[in-house]
Amino acid sequence: MSSATRPFIRPAEPEDVPALVRLRLANAERHVQLAPDLFRLPDADAVRRHFEVTLPHSLISVAEVAGEVVGMVEVVLLTDPPDHQILVPRRAADVHTVVLDGHRGRGVGAALVAAAERMAVAHGVTIIYANIFATNDDAVAFYSAHGFGPRGILLSKPCG
């Protein structure tokens, strides 16, 4: 991979908000195609406001290729289990990775996940979760290829 096509990973900055919105909406469109009964396309203004408010305290990095933001990764720190629960306390985080369609399969996602792991470790995280609905075979394959594996079973049931 030449240096022109190698992703440059850096912390997201306020000027990246339009690119973050574009990435979030592209990710939503892809998920709506996978499972329209589970996912929706959020309002672009709501997404913009979210990033404007949370970006200063978020663990978000972006991937640039040839000066264009083509991907992002967000590490969401989770709270420790309360003292009354039986789980062994471990600092944990969720990871969310998005890469634009034309840049998948070129090492962008791998670079973003590596950056997420470094961010997580720097914040004392010992386990990262990639929450994926089983219908997203591409995401399961991607995260599996980067060392993620099953951990328990999450069951759900609609109420009402």
Image (cartoon, rainbow, N blue to C red):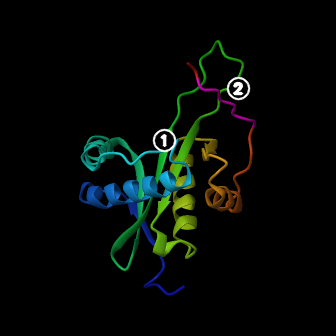
Amino acid type, residue under disc 2 in the picture? Val
Label 2: which secondary element:
loop
Q: Nearer the viewer, residue 4 or 89?
A: 4
**Residue plotted at (67% across, 16% down):** 85
Q: Main secondary structure of the magenta part?
A: loop
Query: Hey, what amino acid is under mark 1?
Result: Val
- Total marks drawn? 2
Furthest-bottom residue in view? 2
Percent x, y of residue 60: 41, 52
Q: In which quadrant will I find the C terminus?
A: top right
Image: magenta residue range: 152-158
Can you tell which mark lies on residue 95? none
User: Which circle marks residue 88 in the picture?
Assistant: 2
- The residue positioned farthest toward the top in the image shown: 84
Q: Position of residue 21 (x, y in %)?
A: 32, 55
Q: Is residue 25 magenta?
A: no
Give the residue at x 59% y 37%.
92
Does 82 sit above or below residue 9?
above
Question: What is the secondary structure assignment of the residue under circle 1?
Answer: strand
Q: Earlier in the sequence, mark 2 or mark 1?
A: 1
Which residue does the image show at 34% across and 60% down from the upper left? 22
Q: Which residue is mark 1?
A: 76
Asked if residue 45 is positioned above or below residue 106 in the image, the reply reads above
Q: State the image coordinates of residue 14 (x, y, percent, origin top left).
A: 25, 54
53 relative to 84 in the view: left or right: left
Camera-side residue: 145 or 127? 145
Q: Which residue is at a point 59% across and 18% down the rendered structure image?
A: 82
Residue 140 x %, y %: 67, 55
